[in-house]
Image (cartoon, rainbow, N blue to C red):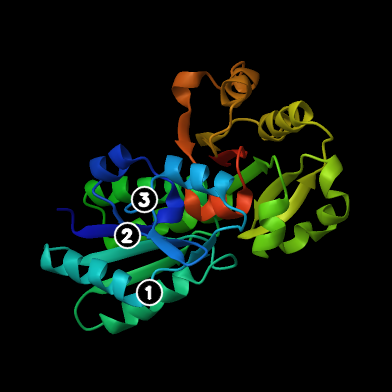
Amino acid sequence: MPGVQIVTDSACDLEPEEVERYGIRVVPLSIRFGDREFIDREELSVEEFYERMAASDTLPETAAPPPGKFEQAFRDAASNGAEAVVCINLSSALSATMQSAQNAATAVAGDIDVRVIDSRSITGGLGTQVVEAAKAAAEGKSVDDVVAVVEDLVPRTEIYGALDTLENLKKGGRIGNARALLGSMLSFKPLIHIADGAVEEAGKPRTRKRALEALRDKLFAEGNVSHLRVCHGEAPDLEEFLELISPRYPREEITVCKIGAVIGTHGGPRIIGVCYVK
């Protein structure tokens, strides 16, 4: 085991093989449908989540993990021989998850050095920061060096998403500065931007086709980017979007990941997003 253990939460949307390959510990949030609560990805798979959401009259709700879950992860790292933990969490502007991790870090302060970092990101953006931290840890870098790797990535991590519906974002209360979109909700397929951890409006295309083209244009306008991930919520037109960006980003250079329940609850079904590092 490396001297530094990387911990994150289930909003990172990493595929199980990535989690395993890099020895990452993922602390799950929970998802509630009415009076039934599920532990993300343990009691409810991504596919089951979207099926359940489609069949449900009420929107699901997400809840941050209790501090005890993070504390357990930190103590396990210590008992497995880790000298330190770097815990990278989804944006504190969108969830109480980081607060929970910080409380746990305080609880274990005498036993293991834990650094909690706000990714100011979600889904594949958070996932990229976590994987790069894990690679640095695997190379034997010190906890300070691993933290520096993540802190360098945070301000350069960008996410744009094309929503197929605003219903979830509106009902979930996570609309942030994109509130202006609500008045004209039905006639647009809005683009959102995760800017400094919060949700902002990035465009109001009228059709899904236009929305995906606008998403491509945002990506292409950046010049060359690295660590490109295309994340989606069971989007039926995913392949069409991959084709749109293929002139510059061939399929084999892209990591495709499914947006899980934590972000899917707010982003809604069929969302497609691009996450990259400037």
Q: CA distance from mark 3 to mark 2?
A: 16 Å
Tag 2 and tag 1, C-beta contact below 8 Å: no
Secondary structure beneath dot 1 equals: loop
Residue 225, visible in the rendered structure: yes
Q: Is residue 41 above or below residue 89?
A: above
Label 2: element kind: strand
Instruction: Give the amino acid type for the residue marked by disc 2 in the picture.
Output: Val
Q: Which residue is mark 1?
A: 66
* 20 with respect to 101 (left or right): left
Please tell me how crowded label 2 is: few (under 14), some (14-19), or many (20+) other residues with Cα within 10 Å: many
Q: Is residue 182 above or below residue 49?
A: below
Read off the residue under disc 3.
Answer: 41
Name the mark on residue 7.
2
Q: In the image, is 214 to the left or to the right of 198?
A: right
Q: CA distance from mark 1 to mark 3?
A: 16 Å
Among the 4 quarters of the image, the one containing residue 182? bottom right
In this rendering, the label closer to the viewer, 3 or 2: 3
Residue 141: give x, y in percent of width and height.
26, 53
